[in-house]
Image (spheres, rainbow, N blue to C red):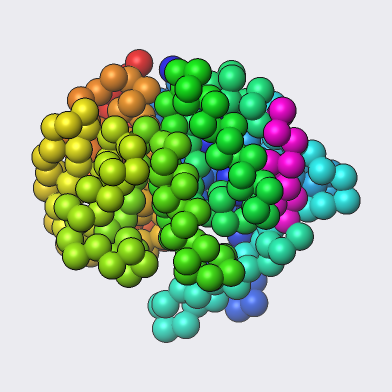
Amino acid sequence: MRILAIGECMAEMAPTDAPSTYQMGFAGDTFNTAWYLAQLTPETPLSYFTAVGDDAISSRMLGAMRESGINTQQVRIVPNRSVGLYLITLNNGERSFTYWRGQSAARLLAQDKQALAHAMMQSDLIYFSGITLAILNPEGRAALLDVARSARRGGKRIAFDPNLRPHLWDSSSEMTENIMQAAAVSDIALPSFEDEATWFSDKNPAATLQRYARAGAETIVVKNGAETVLYRTRGAEGSVHVPPLASVVDTTAAGDSFNAGILAGLATDTPLPDSIALACKLAGHVVQGKGALVPINQSLLDSCPQP
Ligand code: AMP
């Protein structure tokens, strides 16, 4: 199975122990998922679709993607643009984020509808998120959903994480309307209950699950932090216990890494409850480390199904 992840990767400046000294890295929700996925199932062909600029930082980003085992052949190069940037500030151990992404080339990723359609044609499973949609203009969103809808009709599977980020949208109603339009073109929905409860007023994870089922998703996995994961696939429902952790260091990319476990399971035809157990194990490891991209240890990789 060939997988395509679509979205924005940004340059990250993370504080180090030395005052006013930052370490540069690359991260972004769908990219984080691809990064974990490349390690979980290195045999699975995996591409990232985005747009970057034609400057030095853009080529460095593409190099970092390739080094992680992610194919960048479909990435669009937009002259005179660059990549988005965010800076992490630590305040008594609490991380806060400042973003510069208004002029990011990734905002133009859906401008060339044919390129998007071509990338989807070369894949079997297509993954994007609410953040992918949020950074696009209305025409770009319509183009992405249109191409995804056609790809689905042509037999491709579409996986979607709503990843609700109200500050990226003009209004909460614009966000919720667009999210449900994306859900309507998706086979697999991967929502996080806490955010869904806030913005859709879901009373419990079962209500979240039902809402995405009504939108047309065949497989739904509702994440809920340390609480039980609820799922439904082809009409069968169940839940998977989340192993408790002694300590949580940083929840950045918990959901992104969890999604990588689910996509790895889909790529290898693993039964969904087993994929969820793997996803919990991986996300549990990630929240015990700092930052979005936490190196995975061999024992975790050994427990992974291979295609
Ligand atoms: P979330 O998107 O916050 O619901 O979290 C995604 C996944 O990360 C959850 O389904 C868990 O597998 C894992 N996770 C997040 N927070 C915790 C926690 N405090 N303890 C254990 N696992 C967690």
The relative height of residue 145 versus residue 99 in the rendered view (above or below) is above
The image quadrant of residue 252 is bottom left
The relative height of residue 178 versus residue 112 in the rendered view (above or below) is below
Q: Residue at x 68, y 62 (%)?
A: 101
Q: Which residues are magenta?
A: 104-115
Q: Position of residue 135 (x, y in %)?
A: 62, 56
Q: Position of residue 182 (x, y in %)?
A: 47, 45
Which of 233 and 264 lies nearest the eye of the viewer? 233
The relative height of residue 32 versus residue 163 in the rendered view (above or below) is above
The image quadrant of residue 65 is top right
Q: Residue at x 33, y 26 (%)?
A: 266
108 magenta-colored: yes
The image quadrant of residue 18 is bottom right
Q: Is residue 86 left or right of residue 282?
A: right
Which of 195 and 284 lies nearest the eye of the viewer? 195
Image quarter where the N terminus lies is top left
Image quarter where the C terminus lies is top left
Q: Is residue 78 left or right of residue 205?
A: right
Q: Position of residue 90 (x, y in %)?
A: 49, 77
Q: In the displayed orientation, state which residue is furthest to the bottom.
A: 92
Q: Is residue 89 left or right of residue 270?
A: right
Instruction: Evaluate whether residue 36 shows in this view.
Output: no
Q: Residue at x 71, y 64 (%)?
A: 102
